[in-house]
Image (cartoon, rainbow, N blue to C red):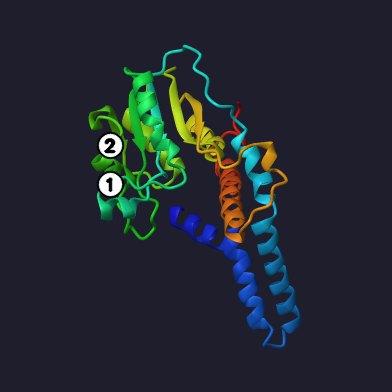
Amino acid sequence: MFYLSKLVWLLMEPSTALTLAVLVGALLCRTRLALWGRRLGIAGAVGLLIGGFTPLSTLILRPLEEHFPPFQDDGIPVAGVLVLGGALQTEVAVGRAQFAVNEAAERFTILPALARRYPEARLVFVGGSGDPLGGIPPEADVVRRVIGDLIPPDRLVYERASRNTHENAVNSFVQLRPGKGERWLLVTSAWHMPRSVALFRKAGWTVVPFPVDYRSSGSGDDYRPFTSVSQGLRRLDLATKEWVGLVFARLSGQSEALLPER
């Protein structure tokens, strides 16, 4: 299922699918299907322009980012903190032997503050390798080598076998065996939080969302166009993947609802 999902998404990713439509349309223009080729090529080109320049992707992304509000400490004890991987540029970090983060860096940078705020809480980094070819090492292994730049390395427990968010939830539950009613903070990107909460709750966790890494600034972005096609398409790919993941999780029984309760 893991490899099939990777293949399906490779073809469904909007930026890839629209680009392929343009290329296939151009090739068909040299055949007896030239009319269909022109239609397909024009549709792909228009889709790239709409997805790349208009705020369409922001309108798709913002409901995910705002499904859960920012975390407010209510004084209830926190048993532990689960930090999902995805913020490390693993190959660069291995090659340069230092922290190399991507746009989701807030998943890491919040760690020192949480370690100080909850000195008795267990800190857990959850992240293996999602590389279907197996060439990229587990993210947890890389973090273990370089985490001393942020917090004492002995504060963290690692889950390194998971390849996707569903396995993050299941494998970490089996490894850590949280007690009934234990309250754990779940730290991940705001746009990824609805799917993560749904999967972790289904796996048996009692998690409280701690969203970070917002990509939009709020409602002010709803009518703001992008200045480059690549920016808009990157956000469109991101938002589409999350919605597709939510639908798949619901249909496959990995979650109880399309969007988890707040």
Residue 194 on image: x %, y %: 56, 35
Which residue sits at x=31%, y=45%? 99
Circle 2: residue type: Asp
User: In the rendered image, is residue 118 in sight?
Assistant: yes
Circle 1: residue type: Gln
Q: 105 and 250: which one is in front?
A: 105
Q: Give whichever of discs 2 and 1 has the lower sequence position.
A: 1
Q: Is residue 236 left or right of residue 188?
A: right
Which residue sits at x=65%, y=46%? 58
Which residue sits at x=35%, y=45%? 128
Residue at the far front in the pictured view? 227
Q: Is residue 34 left or right of residue 6?
A: right
Circle on res. 178 = none
Image quadrant in which you'd find residue 79: top left
Query: What quarter of the picture does the C terminus occupy?
Result: top right
Residue 40 on image: x %, y %: 71, 73
Circle on res. 149 = 2
Mark 1, residue position:
98
In the rendered structure, are the residues bearing label 2 and label 1 in contact, judged by CB atoms less than 8 Å apart? yes
Disc 1 crowd, CA 10 A, few/some/many (<14, 14-19, 20+): some
Residue 45 on image: x %, y %: 68, 69
Residue 224 on image: x %, y %: 69, 47
